[in-house]
Image (spheres, rainbow, N blue to C red):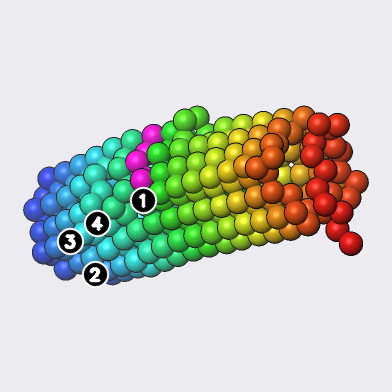
Amino acid sequence: MDLSGAFLESANLAGTVLRDAKLTGTVLARADLSGASLSGADLSLANLGGATLVGTDCTFAVFDEATLMGAKLAGTVFAGARFDKTMFLEAVFEDVSFASAEMVAPLFMKVDLRRVSFVGARLPQARFIDVELESGDFASAELPQAQFIQARADRADFTGADVSGGSFAQGSSCVGARFGSARLVGTMLRGLSLREASLAGADLSKADLSGADLRGASLARVRGRDARLVRADLRGADLRGADLLGAIVQKARIEGADLTGASLARADLALVRSDEATKLDRVLSTDARVHPKWREPEVVR
């Protein structure tokens, strides 16, 4: 079925089977597509502003450069669908799945994504601006160069995700978020609240965590070579076995932190603040730049 360029504004298409249909550039603004089947359909450049997609099957559909501004998406399945520069502005989401979807440079702005699954989705250069992501699920998602701006992602799950080269900025928050085994190489995390977050086993090489709040966070076994932790708050953090070779940790606070078995070789530890509760057993600090007040760890033999 070829409906490319058709004007179907406010049309009642509930329950309609449009499987594999050509809907390129079609105007579907405010259309009711509840329960419809759009599986495999091509909706590139389509206008779905204000459309209703409740229980709609959009598996393997194509939404390249489509607009879903103000669209209502509830129980919508987008598994395997493709989105290239698709815009979701003020759309309403409820129990939506983008699992395994291909989403290149999509824009999510002023939306609530707390009940949306991005598990295993590919979202390079995605932009999340002024969004609610609390407890959101990005496990194993590919998010290289993704931008999170004013993203409230407390307790979100990024386990095994790749956010390399991306950024969390301008009021974003990841308190209690899970980044276990995630890839955060070169990611900008400056000033980000990561209190009580889990980053165990994550790759933070060359990441910038300057001024980040990492109090009580789990950073056990992280790979943080050449990372920047200037003025980071690591009080009570778990850094056991962390690899911080060449990291810049100037003026960081590590009171009560556990660095047992960590590598700080060639790290810049100038003016780091520690206390008697800081655990430094078996720390490797070869060629580290150490301020006189730094409490020297036991020598590894």
Would you say the residues marked 2 and 3 are in contact, meaning their CB atoms lie under 8 Å apart?
A: no
Q: In terms of depth relative to the viewer, which is nearer, 87 or 41?
A: 87
Q: CA distance from mark 2 to mark 3?
A: 15 Å
Nearest to the eye among marks 4 and 3: give it.
4
Q: Which type of secondary structure does the marked residue at label 1 adopt?
A: loop
* Residue 62 in sight: no
For residue 194, side relative to residue 95 (left or right): right
Nearest to the eye among marks 2 and 4: give it.
4
Q: CA distance from mark 2 to mark 1?
A: 33 Å
Q: CA distance from mark 1 to mark 4?
A: 13 Å
Q: Which residue is mark 2?
A: 19
Q: CA distance from mark 2 to mark 4?
A: 22 Å
**Are there few (<14), some (14-19), or many (20+) residues within 10 Å of tag 1?**
many
Q: Amino acid at mark 2?
A: Arg
Q: In terms of depth relative to the viewer, which is nearer, 170 or 31?
A: 170
* Highlighted magenta segment, given as a residue range: 130-134
Residue 157, labelled with which disc?
Answer: none
Whether residue 179 is in magenta: the answer is no
Tell me residue 15's x, y (percent).
11, 64
Tell me residue 54's x, y (percent).
17, 56
Q: Which residue is mark 4?
A: 95
Q: Residue at x 71, y 33 (%)?
A: 273
Q: Amino acid at mark 3?
A: Gly
Residue 135, labelled with which disc?
Answer: 1
